[in-house]
Amino acid sequence: MQMSGNCYKVRLVARQLGIPIALKEYPEHGGLTRQATFLAKNPNGRVPMLEFDDGRCLVESGAIIFHLAEGSRLIPTESWDRAQMLQWMFFEQYSHEPYVAVARFWLGYASKEELEAKRALIPEWHAKGNAALAVMETHLARHDWFAGNRYSLADVALYAYTHCADEGGFDLSAYPALSAWLIRVAAQPGHIPLSETW
Amino acid sequence: MQMSGNCYKVRLVARQLGIPIALKEYPEHGGLTRQATFLAKNPNGRVPMLEFDDGRCLVESGAIIFHLAEGSRLIPTESWDRAQMLQWMFFEQYSHEPYVAVARFWLGYASKEELEAKRALIPEWHAKGNAALAVMETHLARHDWFAGNRYSLADVALYAYTHCADEGGFDLSAYPALSAWLIRVAAQPGHIPLSETW
Protein backbone atom coordinates (compact mmCIF):
# COMPACT_ATOMS: atom_id res chain seq x y z
CA MET A 1 0.00 0.00 0.00
CA GLN A 2 2.24 2.72 -1.42
CA MET A 3 0.69 5.62 0.56
CA SER A 4 0.90 3.81 3.92
CA GLY A 5 3.63 5.02 6.26
CA ASN A 6 3.65 1.61 7.93
CA CYS A 7 4.47 -0.01 4.57
CA TYR A 8 7.02 2.74 3.83
CA LYS A 9 8.96 1.73 6.98
CA VAL A 10 9.48 -1.74 5.50
CA ARG A 11 10.52 -0.45 2.05
CA LEU A 12 12.94 2.03 3.64
CA VAL A 13 14.63 -0.53 5.90
CA ALA A 14 14.85 -3.12 3.12
CA ARG A 15 16.43 -0.56 0.79
CA GLN A 16 18.86 0.78 3.38
CA LEU A 17 20.01 -2.71 4.32
CA GLY A 18 20.09 -4.04 0.76
CA ILE A 19 17.50 -6.75 1.45
CA PRO A 20 15.77 -7.88 -1.75
CA ILE A 21 12.00 -7.96 -1.34
CA ALA A 22 9.30 -7.95 -3.99
CA LEU A 23 6.34 -5.65 -3.46
CA LYS A 24 2.71 -6.54 -3.91
CA GLU A 25 0.42 -3.52 -4.01
CA TYR A 26 -2.77 -3.45 -1.94
CA PRO A 27 -4.58 -0.24 -2.98
CA GLU A 28 -5.91 1.72 0.01
CA HIS A 29 -9.46 1.55 -1.26
CA GLY A 30 -9.54 -1.93 -2.78
CA GLY A 31 -10.61 -3.93 0.27
CA LEU A 32 -8.17 -6.71 -0.69
CA THR A 33 -6.84 -6.99 2.86
CA ARG A 34 -10.28 -7.94 4.15
CA GLN A 35 -10.83 -10.76 1.65
CA ALA A 36 -10.58 -14.42 2.65
CA THR A 37 -7.32 -15.16 0.84
CA PHE A 38 -5.58 -12.32 2.69
CA LEU A 39 -7.26 -13.02 6.04
CA ALA A 40 -5.98 -16.59 5.86
CA LYS A 41 -2.48 -15.11 6.02
CA ASN A 42 -3.22 -12.23 8.40
CA PRO A 43 -6.49 -12.56 10.34
CA ASN A 44 -6.08 -8.93 11.41
CA GLY A 45 -6.55 -7.81 7.79
CA ARG A 46 -3.76 -5.24 7.63
CA VAL A 47 -0.64 -4.40 5.68
CA PRO A 48 2.33 -4.42 5.70
CA MET A 49 2.74 -8.18 5.62
CA LEU A 50 6.09 -9.84 4.95
CA GLU A 51 5.50 -13.12 3.15
CA PHE A 52 8.31 -15.63 2.74
CA ASP A 53 8.72 -18.12 -0.11
CA ASP A 54 8.04 -20.97 2.34
CA GLY A 55 4.67 -19.48 3.30
CA ARG A 56 5.56 -17.90 6.63
CA CYS A 57 3.96 -14.49 7.17
CA LEU A 58 4.96 -11.71 9.54
CA VAL A 59 2.80 -8.65 10.21
CA GLU A 60 3.03 -5.42 12.25
CA SER A 61 5.49 -2.91 10.81
CA GLY A 62 7.50 -2.75 14.04
CA ALA A 63 8.02 -6.51 14.13
CA ILE A 64 8.83 -6.67 10.42
CA ILE A 65 11.53 -4.00 10.50
CA PHE A 66 12.97 -5.45 13.73
CA HIS A 67 13.25 -8.83 12.00
CA LEU A 68 14.74 -7.42 8.79
CA ALA A 69 17.25 -5.33 10.73
CA GLU A 70 18.41 -7.86 13.34
CA GLY A 71 22.21 -7.77 13.51
CA SER A 72 22.41 -4.62 11.36
CA ARG A 73 23.48 -1.04 12.10
CA LEU A 74 19.81 -0.06 12.45
CA ILE A 75 19.46 -1.82 15.83
CA PRO A 76 21.76 -0.67 18.65
CA THR A 77 23.93 -3.40 20.12
CA GLU A 78 23.66 -2.12 23.69
CA SER A 79 20.64 -3.40 25.65
CA TRP A 80 19.68 0.01 27.07
CA ASP A 81 19.83 1.67 23.64
CA ARG A 82 17.74 -1.17 22.17
CA ALA A 83 15.17 -0.68 24.94
CA GLN A 84 14.89 3.00 24.10
CA MET A 85 14.53 2.17 20.41
CA LEU A 86 11.61 -0.11 21.24
CA GLN A 87 10.15 2.51 23.59
CA TRP A 88 9.87 4.97 20.71
CA MET A 89 8.56 2.31 18.32
CA PHE A 90 5.76 1.46 20.77
CA PHE A 91 5.15 5.17 21.39
CA GLU A 92 4.72 5.66 17.65
CA GLN A 93 2.14 2.92 17.31
CA TYR A 94 0.16 3.86 20.42
CA SER A 95 0.39 7.65 20.83
CA HIS A 96 1.36 8.95 17.36
CA GLU A 97 0.09 6.82 14.47
CA PRO A 98 -3.57 6.61 15.65
CA TYR A 99 -3.79 10.42 15.38
CA VAL A 100 -1.10 11.67 12.97
CA ALA A 101 -1.54 8.88 10.42
CA VAL A 102 -5.29 8.63 10.82
CA ALA A 103 -5.75 12.39 10.29
CA ARG A 104 -3.60 12.16 7.16
CA PHE A 105 -5.63 9.26 5.78
CA TRP A 106 -9.06 10.82 6.28
CA LEU A 107 -8.05 14.38 5.37
CA GLY A 108 -5.75 13.46 2.52
CA TYR A 109 -6.88 10.18 1.00
CA ALA A 110 -10.59 9.62 1.73
CA SER A 111 -13.54 10.88 -0.29
CA LYS A 112 -15.44 13.99 0.80
CA GLU A 113 -18.37 11.80 1.90
CA GLU A 114 -16.13 9.51 3.96
CA LEU A 115 -14.45 12.48 5.60
CA GLU A 116 -17.82 14.03 6.50
CA ALA A 117 -18.65 10.97 8.61
CA LYS A 118 -15.40 11.43 10.53
CA ARG A 119 -15.36 15.23 10.81
CA ALA A 120 -16.28 15.29 14.51
CA LEU A 121 -13.07 13.37 15.30
CA ILE A 122 -10.68 15.84 13.66
CA PRO A 123 -10.15 18.04 16.78
CA GLU A 124 -9.16 14.98 18.86
CA TRP A 125 -6.79 13.73 16.13
CA HIS A 126 -5.12 17.14 16.01
CA ALA A 127 -4.93 17.56 19.80
CA LYS A 128 -3.46 14.11 20.44
CA GLY A 129 -1.32 14.18 17.31
CA ASN A 130 0.18 17.52 18.32
CA ALA A 131 0.76 16.14 21.82
CA ALA A 132 2.79 13.31 20.27
CA LEU A 133 4.74 15.73 18.06
CA ALA A 134 5.46 17.84 21.17
CA VAL A 135 6.85 14.77 22.97
CA MET A 136 9.16 14.21 19.99
CA GLU A 137 10.15 17.90 19.99
CA THR A 138 11.05 17.71 23.70
CA HIS A 139 13.35 14.76 23.01
CA LEU A 140 14.88 16.21 19.83
CA ALA A 141 15.66 19.52 21.51
CA ARG A 142 18.34 17.60 23.40
CA HIS A 143 19.18 14.63 21.17
CA ASP A 144 19.96 14.17 17.48
CA TRP A 145 18.36 10.71 17.36
CA PHE A 146 15.79 8.73 19.31
CA ALA A 147 18.00 5.90 20.59
CA GLY A 148 21.68 5.16 21.04
CA ASN A 149 22.89 8.51 19.67
CA ARG A 150 22.53 7.28 16.12
CA TYR A 151 19.99 6.62 13.40
CA SER A 152 17.98 3.48 14.21
CA LEU A 153 14.62 1.81 13.65
CA ALA A 154 13.13 4.30 16.12
CA ASP A 155 13.88 7.10 13.67
CA VAL A 156 12.49 5.08 10.76
CA ALA A 157 9.28 4.32 12.67
CA LEU A 158 8.70 7.95 13.69
CA TYR A 159 9.77 9.46 10.36
CA ALA A 160 7.22 7.47 8.36
CA TYR A 161 4.14 9.45 9.36
CA THR A 162 5.80 12.57 10.79
CA HIS A 163 7.41 13.80 7.58
CA CYS A 164 4.03 13.85 5.79
CA ALA A 165 1.95 15.02 8.77
CA ASP A 166 1.11 18.25 6.91
CA GLU A 167 -1.21 16.13 4.75
CA GLY A 168 -3.25 15.57 7.91
CA GLY A 169 -3.39 19.27 8.78
CA PHE A 170 -0.42 19.42 11.17
CA ASP A 171 1.89 22.44 11.06
CA LEU A 172 5.42 21.08 11.42
CA SER A 173 6.96 24.56 11.45
CA ALA A 174 5.83 24.72 15.09
CA TYR A 175 8.44 22.04 15.87
CA PRO A 176 11.92 23.31 14.94
CA ALA A 177 14.00 20.49 16.47
CA LEU A 178 11.71 17.94 14.87
CA SER A 179 11.99 19.72 11.52
CA ALA A 180 15.79 19.59 11.71
CA TRP A 181 15.64 15.88 12.56
CA LEU A 182 13.47 15.21 9.49
CA ILE A 183 16.28 16.66 7.34
CA ARG A 184 18.88 14.50 9.13
CA VAL A 185 16.82 11.36 8.54
CA ALA A 186 16.30 12.14 4.84
CA ALA A 187 20.07 12.61 4.47
CA GLN A 188 20.86 9.07 5.65
CA PRO A 189 22.59 6.79 3.11
CA GLY A 190 20.10 4.81 1.04
CA HIS A 191 17.12 6.95 2.09
CA ILE A 192 14.12 6.74 -0.24
CA PRO A 193 11.03 8.97 -0.18
CA LEU A 194 7.62 7.50 0.59
CA SER A 195 6.52 8.15 -2.99
CA GLU A 196 9.37 6.22 -4.60
CA THR A 197 8.09 3.25 -6.52
CA TRP A 198 10.26 0.18 -6.30
CA MET B 1 -1.23 2.09 38.83
CA GLN B 2 -2.43 -1.17 40.31
CA MET B 3 -5.50 -1.55 38.05
CA SER B 4 -3.57 -0.92 34.82
CA GLY B 5 -2.90 -3.98 32.69
CA ASN B 6 0.13 -2.23 31.21
CA CYS B 7 1.61 -1.88 34.71
CA TYR B 8 0.61 -5.47 35.53
CA LYS B 9 2.79 -6.70 32.65
CA VAL B 10 5.84 -5.18 34.34
CA ARG B 11 4.99 -6.59 37.80
CA LEU B 12 4.36 -10.03 36.32
CA VAL B 13 7.62 -10.18 34.37
CA ALA B 14 9.66 -8.83 37.29
CA ARG B 15 8.14 -11.41 39.61
CA GLN B 16 8.57 -14.31 37.19
CA LEU B 17 12.20 -13.43 36.55
CA GLY B 18 13.03 -12.60 40.18
CA ILE B 19 13.97 -8.99 39.37
CA PRO B 20 13.68 -6.78 42.45
CA ILE B 21 11.77 -3.58 41.69
CA ALA B 22 10.05 -1.19 44.08
CA LEU B 23 6.60 0.02 43.16
CA LYS B 24 5.34 3.58 43.31
CA GLU B 25 1.58 3.86 43.03
CA TYR B 26 0.00 6.39 40.67
CA PRO B 27 -3.77 6.20 41.36
CA GLU B 28 -5.85 6.10 38.17
CA HIS B 29 -7.75 9.23 39.11
CA GLY B 30 -5.02 11.26 40.77
CA GLY B 31 -3.62 13.09 37.76
CA LEU B 32 -0.07 12.61 39.09
CA THR B 33 1.22 11.47 35.70
CA ARG B 34 0.31 14.81 34.15
CA GLN B 35 2.12 16.92 36.73
CA ALA B 36 5.42 18.65 35.94
CA THR B 37 7.63 16.41 38.09
CA PHE B 38 6.36 13.33 36.27
CA LEU B 39 6.35 14.95 32.82
CA ALA B 40 10.03 15.81 33.29
CA LYS B 41 10.67 12.06 33.40
CA ASN B 42 8.08 11.00 30.80
CA PRO B 43 6.79 13.84 28.59
CA ASN B 44 4.07 11.46 27.37
CA GLY B 45 2.54 11.42 30.87
CA ARG B 46 1.86 7.70 31.17
CA VAL B 47 2.65 4.74 33.35
CA PRO B 48 4.27 2.26 33.61
CA MET B 49 7.63 3.95 33.91
CA LEU B 50 10.75 2.09 34.98
CA GLU B 51 13.03 4.44 36.88
CA PHE B 52 16.60 3.48 37.68
CA ASP B 53 18.64 4.61 40.67
CA ASP B 54 20.89 6.60 38.32
CA GLY B 55 17.92 8.58 36.99
CA ARG B 56 17.38 6.82 33.67
CA CYS B 57 13.72 6.28 32.82
CA LEU B 58 12.15 3.81 30.41
CA VAL B 59 8.48 3.92 29.38
CA GLU B 60 6.10 1.89 27.21
CA SER B 61 5.18 -1.46 28.75
CA GLY B 62 6.42 -3.42 25.72
CA ALA B 63 9.87 -1.81 25.87
CA ILE B 64 10.09 -2.22 29.65
CA ILE B 65 9.30 -5.93 29.68
CA PHE B 66 11.60 -6.52 26.68
CA HIS B 67 14.42 -4.83 28.60
CA LEU B 68 13.73 -6.68 31.86
CA ALA B 69 13.51 -10.02 30.06
CA GLU B 70 16.51 -9.76 27.71
CA GLY B 71 18.47 -13.00 27.89
CA SER B 72 15.74 -14.78 29.88
CA ARG B 73 13.38 -17.65 29.05
CA LEU B 74 10.62 -15.11 28.31
CA ILE B 75 12.23 -14.05 25.01
CA PRO B 76 12.76 -16.73 22.36
CA THR B 77 16.36 -17.17 21.25
CA GLU B 78 15.49 -17.80 17.59
CA SER B 79 15.12 -14.68 15.44
CA TRP B 80 11.87 -15.79 13.76
CA ASP B 81 10.24 -16.64 17.10
CA ARG B 82 11.35 -13.28 18.50
CA ALA B 83 9.83 -11.52 15.49
CA GLN B 84 6.52 -13.25 16.12
CA MET B 85 6.67 -12.30 19.78
CA LEU B 86 7.10 -8.65 18.81
CA GLN B 87 4.34 -8.97 16.20
CA TRP B 88 1.86 -9.92 18.91
CA MET B 89 3.15 -7.26 21.30
CA PHE B 90 2.60 -4.57 18.65
CA PHE B 91 -0.78 -6.11 17.78
CA GLU B 92 -1.77 -5.83 21.43
CA GLN B 93 -0.90 -2.16 21.68
CA TYR B 94 -2.46 -1.16 18.35
CA SER B 95 -5.47 -3.43 17.77
CA HIS B 96 -6.37 -4.78 21.23
CA GLU B 97 -5.54 -2.41 24.10
CA PRO B 98 -7.22 0.71 22.60
CA TYR B 99 -10.55 -1.14 22.65
CA VAL B 100 -10.39 -3.95 25.23
CA ALA B 101 -8.53 -1.95 27.87
CA VAL B 102 -10.30 1.31 27.13
CA ALA B 103 -13.75 -0.31 27.43
CA ARG B 104 -12.68 -1.85 30.76
CA PHE B 105 -11.49 1.50 32.09
CA TRP B 106 -14.59 3.49 31.21
CA LEU B 107 -17.12 0.77 32.00
CA GLY B 108 -15.36 -0.52 35.10
CA TYR B 109 -13.37 2.29 36.67
CA ALA B 110 -14.83 5.66 35.63
CA SER B 111 -17.67 7.54 37.30
CA LYS B 112 -21.18 7.38 35.87
CA GLU B 113 -20.83 10.96 34.62
CA GLU B 114 -17.52 10.25 32.91
CA LEU B 115 -18.96 7.14 31.28
CA GLU B 116 -21.97 9.07 29.99
CA ALA B 117 -19.67 11.33 27.99
CA LYS B 118 -18.13 8.27 26.34
CA ARG B 119 -21.24 6.15 25.88
CA ALA B 120 -21.46 6.69 22.10
CA LEU B 121 -18.05 5.01 21.71
CA ILE B 122 -18.98 1.75 23.44
CA PRO B 123 -20.24 -0.04 20.28
CA GLU B 124 -16.95 0.69 18.46
CA TRP B 125 -14.89 -0.48 21.45
CA HIS B 126 -16.85 -3.73 21.55
CA ALA B 127 -16.75 -4.31 17.79
CA LYS B 128 -13.01 -3.70 17.46
CA GLY B 129 -12.21 -5.38 20.78
CA ASN B 130 -14.12 -8.49 19.74
CA ALA B 131 -12.31 -8.41 16.38
CA ALA B 132 -8.99 -8.49 18.27
CA LEU B 133 -10.18 -11.33 20.51
CA ALA B 134 -11.26 -13.23 17.38
CA VAL B 135 -7.77 -12.81 15.87
CA MET B 136 -6.35 -14.30 19.09
CA GLU B 137 -8.91 -17.15 18.99
CA THR B 138 -7.93 -17.98 15.40
CA HIS B 139 -4.28 -18.26 16.44
CA LEU B 140 -4.96 -20.17 19.67
CA ALA B 141 -7.17 -22.71 17.92
CA ARG B 142 -3.95 -24.02 16.38
CA HIS B 143 -1.22 -23.00 18.83
CA ASP B 144 -0.75 -23.22 22.59
CA TRP B 145 1.28 -19.99 22.74
CA PHE B 146 1.73 -16.86 20.67
CA ALA B 147 5.41 -17.23 19.75
CA GLY B 148 8.05 -19.96 19.66
CA ASN B 149 5.76 -22.72 20.98
CA ARG B 150 6.27 -21.56 24.53
CA TYR B 151 5.22 -18.93 27.02
CA SER B 152 6.85 -15.58 26.20
CA LEU B 153 6.39 -11.83 26.53
CA ALA B 154 3.74 -12.06 23.81
CA ASP B 155 1.55 -14.09 26.18
CA VAL B 156 2.24 -11.67 29.04
CA ALA B 157 1.32 -8.67 26.88
CA LEU B 158 -1.93 -10.20 25.63
CA TYR B 159 -2.94 -11.75 28.96
CA ALA B 160 -2.83 -8.43 30.82
CA TYR B 161 -6.05 -6.96 29.43
CA THR B 162 -7.64 -10.12 28.00
CA HIS B 163 -8.10 -11.97 31.29
CA CYS B 164 -10.13 -9.08 32.73
CA ALA B 165 -11.95 -8.13 29.52
CA ASP B 166 -15.28 -9.08 31.13
CA GLU B 167 -14.96 -5.87 33.17
CA GLY B 168 -15.30 -4.04 29.86
CA GLY B 169 -18.39 -5.97 28.81
CA PHE B 170 -16.68 -8.66 26.70
CA ASP B 171 -18.00 -12.22 26.86
CA LEU B 172 -14.93 -14.47 26.89
CA SER B 173 -17.02 -17.66 26.84
CA ALA B 174 -17.42 -16.97 23.12
CA TYR B 175 -13.69 -17.75 22.73
CA PRO B 176 -12.96 -21.31 23.91
CA ALA B 177 -9.36 -21.60 22.73
CA LEU B 178 -8.59 -18.21 24.23
CA SER B 179 -10.24 -19.24 27.51
CA ALA B 180 -8.08 -22.38 27.66
CA TRP B 181 -4.96 -20.26 27.00
CA LEU B 182 -5.86 -17.94 29.89
CA ILE B 183 -5.76 -20.95 32.20
CA ARG B 184 -2.39 -22.07 30.79
CA VAL B 185 -0.92 -18.59 31.35
CA ALA B 186 -2.20 -18.41 34.92
CA ALA B 187 -0.59 -21.80 35.62
CA GLN B 188 2.91 -20.60 34.69
CA PRO B 189 5.52 -20.68 37.50
CA GLY B 190 5.62 -17.42 39.43
CA HIS B 191 2.35 -16.13 38.00
CA ILE B 192 0.69 -13.39 40.03
CA PRO B 193 -2.82 -11.99 39.58
CA LEU B 194 -3.36 -8.37 38.59
CA SER B 195 -4.83 -7.62 42.01
CA GLU B 196 -1.83 -8.89 43.97
CA THR B 197 -0.20 -6.10 45.90
CA TRP B 198 3.55 -6.24 46.04
Image: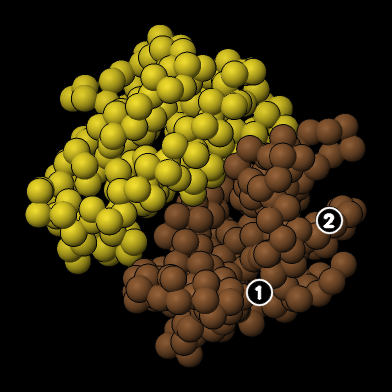
Chain colours: A yellow, B brown
Taking the spot 25% from the left edge, 32% from the top edge, the residue there is: A167
> Can I make out residue B65 in this image?
no
Taking the spot 76% from the left edge, 46% from the top edge, the residue there is: B50
Residue B32 image offset from top left, x and y in percent: 73, 53
Q: Residue B26 appears in which quarter of the rendering? A: bottom right
Taking the spot 89% from the left edge, 37% from the top edge, the residue there is: B53
What is the C-alpha distance between the residues marked 2 and 1?
26 Å
Q: Which amino acid, by three-letter code, is at mark 2?
A: Lys
Q: Which chain does the numbered disc 1 sit on? A: B
Depth check, front residue: A151 or A173: A173
Task: State which quarter of the image contains the N terminus of chain B.
Answer: bottom right
Residue B20 image offset from top left, x and y in percent: 90, 53
Check whether the beta carbons of the residues at disc 2 and disc 1 lie within 8 A of each other. no
Q: Is residue A41 left or right of residue A87?
A: left
Q: Which chain does the numbered disc 2 sit on? A: B
Tell me if residue A103 comes above or below residue A145 in the rendering.
below
> Which dot, 2 or 1, sits closer to the camera?
2
Element at label 2: loop
Q: Is residue A45 left or right of residue A79?
A: left
Q: Residue B36 appears in which quarter of the rendering? A: top right
Residue B62 image offset from top left, x and y in percent: 61, 50
Element at label 1: helix
User: Where is mark 2, residue-wise?
Assistant: B24
Q: Which amino acid, by three-letter code, is at mark 1?
A: Val
User: Where is mark 1, residue-wise?
Assistant: B185
